[in-house]
Image (cartoon, grey):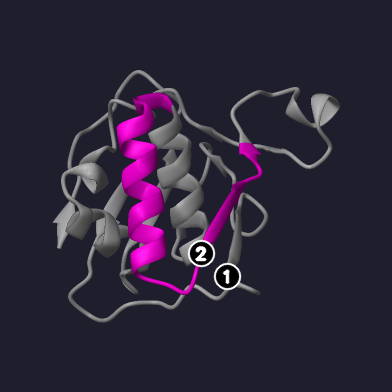
């Protein structure tokens, strides 16, 4: 298990990830081999509090981080999803543009709190195994919190 232990003091909200693939893996279901990132699961990772444990939220979180990091991380994410599921085609319906739905109604806005966004919370991209353990690990999660709790 890998737990991020950094402490953030200058933000009202923060998040961190827990990576745990030791206790089994979740299945990612898709129809006809197609998966839409951003259609299911949480897309806003900020205020909290809460623990997000579903596979769709973990994929959305990883995608939002990878978007800020460049093609290498996006390619790794796509590879890990395809190699560990029946997914053959991925459509990205998630955007970090707040006005994306005005430009394209098929897009959903997503964000990660500024204190938790890249370059923080990137441990999942240390290796393909780490990314698999984060996305598919049945005990992996995203912990959201704020300074009001």
Where residue 60 appears, as percent x and y from the top left, is: 51, 48
* Quadrant that contains the N terminus: bottom left
Which quadrant would the C terminus be assigned to in this image?
A: top left
102 left or right of 40? right
Q: For residue 64, say whether it is visible.
A: yes
Quarter of the image where one finds residue 146: top left
Residue corresponding to mark 2: 88
Residue in view at x 44 percent, y 55 percent: 58
Q: Are marks 1 and 2 in contact (CB under 8 Å)?
A: yes
**Is 20 part of what is drawn in magenta?**
no
Give x and y (percent) for residue 126: 16, 44
Name the residue at the bottom extreme. Answer: 24
Instruction: Out of 143 and 12, give the one closest to the viewer.
Output: 143
Identify which residue is drawn at 18% across, 52% down.
3
- Which residue is painted at 24% across and 43% down in the image? 125
Estimate the x, y position of residue 55 in percent, counting from the top left. 47, 65
**In this rendering, is residue 141 above or below 144?**
below
The magenta stretch spans which residues?
68-94
Question: As drawn, is 9 to the left or to the right of 65?
Answer: left
Q: Which residue is mark 1?
A: 33
Figure check: 88 above or below 98: below
Q: In this rendering, does residue 50 appear at all? A: no
Circle 2 packing at 10 Å, graded few (<14), some (14-19), many (20+), is some
Query: Of helix, strand and loop, which one carries label 1?
Result: loop
Task: Identify whether 10 is placed above or below 65.
Answer: above
**What residue appears at the point 28 percent right and 25 percent down from the top-left corner?**
119
């Amino acid at each position: 298990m890998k737990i991020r232990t950094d402490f953030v003091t200058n933000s009202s909200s923060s998040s961190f990830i827990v990576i745990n693939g030791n206790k089994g893996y979740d299945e990612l279901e898709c129809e006809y081999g197609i998966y839409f990132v951003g259609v299911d699961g949480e897309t806003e990772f900020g205020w909290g509090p809460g623990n997000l444990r579903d596979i769709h939220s973990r994929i959305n979180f990883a995608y939002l981080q990878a978007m800020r990091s460049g093609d290498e991380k996006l390619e790794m994410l796509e590879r890990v999803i395809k190699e560990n599921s029946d997914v053959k085609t991925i459509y990205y319906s998630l955007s970090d543009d707040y006005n994306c739905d005005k430009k394209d109604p098929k897009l959903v806005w997503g964000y990660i709190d500024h204190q938790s966004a890249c370059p923080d919370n990137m441990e999942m991209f240390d290796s393909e195994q780490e990314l698999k353990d984060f996305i598919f690990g049945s005990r992996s999660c995203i912990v959201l919190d704020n300074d009001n709790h």
